[in-house]
Image (cartoon, helix red, strand yellow):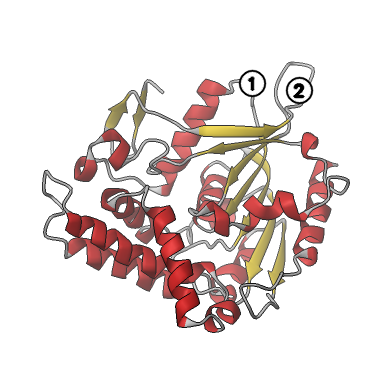
């Protein structure tokens, strides 16, 4: 994009946006795409249920050609416009979740001008925060939303972790240095270890040996090294300010809310279940993971069935 203006008023020029598409667009009589779905998985795709979803369902059950999926890498993600990729580092503009939504909306308008209304938005984890923010701020933009392990605010364990990350970064004496010191890379490793625990259910996490945890943790850290400490800093600041308590009732879209019991980052009782009360046209589904080991296969048939049923309903 030629430029992007933040809520704060700061403007960046020549803004890069990474995206990809899958599926087949369908058009109305005026040439507008009518089956576009924005997709926002977790930060780490290999831990995302929705990333794996296409491998869990039979092509006869859900025809991928019915939908045109668009994934736009968010503002702050190093694959798009971020502190590291712009080389602005600590001078990057502070951004909010509304900025992240406006970033995607502007790109859609410029790249896909024939999408007048989204069919839906799907988000998981922090991607769910984006999905709910979009539905609150621009309630007429979509027909439906699907949120997995999302919440209307950061609280409890997720808030404590975000504050710990903030403390780790603030304690880095070299944060404002002109040279990216090795100590900053070490801080990123510590931050990644903190975040790592949120990607497993308690059942699985507590049944992994220390050696297994070390291996999986190191694999996770390797996958996060594309983000530097400045990417983490601005993303974490954004998360700490996330709160839709005063706006969540604005949602007009049909909503499927899925909570995964036993995951540390989202307390189902206090962060997920209330969404079913706040959003008028919503269905709430709580999934109880049964696998006790990382090496066991989880039975996701209940979630898949709910997704199929919901998508069939909103298509009519």
How crowded pointer 2 is (Cα within 10 Å; few <14, some 14-19, many 20+) is rated as few
Answer whether residue 84 is visible to the viewer in this image: yes
Q: Position of residue 64 (x, y in %)?
A: 77, 39
Where, by quadrant of the figure, is residue 116 drawn?
Answer: top right
Q: Position of residue 47 (x, y in %)?
A: 56, 59
Answer whether residue 155 is visible to the viewer in this image: no
Gap in angstroms between the C-alphas marked 1 and 2: 9 Å
Pick the residue in front: 41 or 35: 41
Determine whether label 1 and label 2 are within 8 Å by CB: yes
At x 37%, y 63%, the residue is 192
Q: Position of residue 95 (x, y in %)?
A: 34, 45
Q: Which residue is mark 1?
A: 114
Q: How many marks?
A: 2
Query: Can you tell which mark lies on residue 166?
Result: none
Position of residue 43 in the picture relative to residue 26 (left or right)? left
Secondary structure under the numbered disc 2 in the rendered image: loop
Q: Which residue is mark 2?
A: 27
At x 47%, y 63%, the residue is 153
214 versus 219 height, above or below: below
90 versus 248 height, above or below: above
Position of residue 207 in the picture relative to residue 99 (left or right)? right
């Amino acid at each position: 994009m030629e430029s992007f203006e933040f809520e704060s008023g700061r403007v960046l020029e020549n803004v890069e946006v990474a995206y990809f598409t899958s599926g087949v667009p369908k058009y109305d009589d005026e040439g507008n795409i009518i089956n576009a779905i924005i997709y926002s998985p977790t930060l780490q795709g290999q831990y995302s249920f929705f990333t794996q979803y296409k491998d869990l369902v039979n092509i006869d059950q859900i025809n991928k050609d019915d939908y045109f999926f668009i994934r736009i890498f968010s503002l702050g993600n190093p694959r798009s416009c971020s502190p590291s990729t712009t080389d602005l580092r600590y001078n990057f503009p502070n951004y909010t979740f509304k900025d992240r939504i406006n970033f995607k909306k502007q790109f859609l308008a410029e790249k896909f001008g024939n999408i007048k209304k989204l069919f839906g938005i799907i988000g998981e984890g922090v991607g769910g925060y984006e999905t709910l923010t979009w539905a609150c701020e621009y309630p007429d933009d979509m027909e439906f939303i699907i949120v997995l392990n999302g919440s209307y605010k950061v609280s409890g364990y997720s808030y404590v972790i975000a504050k710990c990350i903030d403390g780790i970064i603030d304690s880095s004496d070299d944060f404002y240095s002109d040279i990216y010191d090795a100590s900053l890379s070490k801080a990123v490793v510590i931050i990644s270890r903190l975040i790592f625990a949120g990607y497993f259910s308690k059942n699985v996490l507590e049944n992994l040996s220390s050696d297994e945890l070390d291996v999986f943790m190191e694999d996770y850290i390797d996958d996060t090294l594309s983000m530097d400490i400045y990417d983490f800093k601005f993303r974490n600041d954004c998360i700490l300010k996330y709160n839709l308590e005063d706006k969540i009732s604005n949602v007009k879209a049909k909503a499927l809310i899925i909570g995964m019991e036993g995951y540390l980052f989202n307390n189902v009782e206090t962060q997920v279940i209330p969404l079913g009360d706040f959003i008028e046209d919503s269905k709430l589904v709580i999934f109880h993971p049964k696998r006790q080991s990382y090496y066991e296969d989880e039975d996701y048939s209940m979630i898949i069935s709910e997704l199929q049923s919901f998508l069939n309903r909103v298509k009519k």
